[in-house]
Amino acid sequence: MKSALAVLVLLFAGLAFAADVTGKWKATTQGPDGQEMQIIFNLKQDGEKVTGTAEGPMGEMPITEGKISGDEISFTVSAGDMKIVHKGTVSGDEMKLKVEIGEQTMDMTAKREK
């Protein structure tokens, strides 16, 4: 009985420390052509599931396959037939992401808008 209670306490403690990413996040990065590009992520978190939209030069695109575990986040932005994979970490009001577009990768930092 005590061990079951200890496991439950640890489980809930882990959930309490999970990052909450619900809100508007603004990222600025360089596009493949070298020009600066701004992306707004509108995220909604429900437990470990993350959904929302990304707004950028190609318009508004859905966020799919989103999940968060502790401070690790991953999601995909669907741009037509292209899938742009984002993986990274959340620390307070900042997200550091590695973005994979086909065979290319780039780093991106997004900050929560207040």
Image: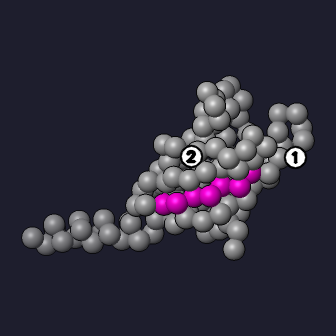
Report the span colored magenta.
39-45
Callout 2 crowding tier (Cα within 10 Å): few <14, some 14–19, many ≥20: many
Q: Position of residue 13 (x, y in %)?
A: 36, 71
Q: Residue at x 83, y 33 (%)?
A: 32
Question: Please, what secondary structure does the residue beneath circle 1 have?
Answer: strand
Q: Residue at x 68, y 25 (%)?
A: 103
Question: Please, what secondary structure does the residue beneath circle 2 have?
Answer: strand
Return the disc, 1 or 2, that comes first in the chain's sequence.
1
Q: Residue at x 82, y 39 (%)?
A: 31
Q: Nearer the viewer, residue 13 or 95?
A: 95
Q: Is residue 79 above or below residue 93?
A: above
Q: Answer whether residue 109 is visible to the viewer in this image.
A: no
Q: Is residue 112 above or below residue 79?
A: below
For disc 1, the marked residue is 36
For disc 2, the marked residue is 63
Q: Position of residue 78 (x, y in %)?
A: 60, 37
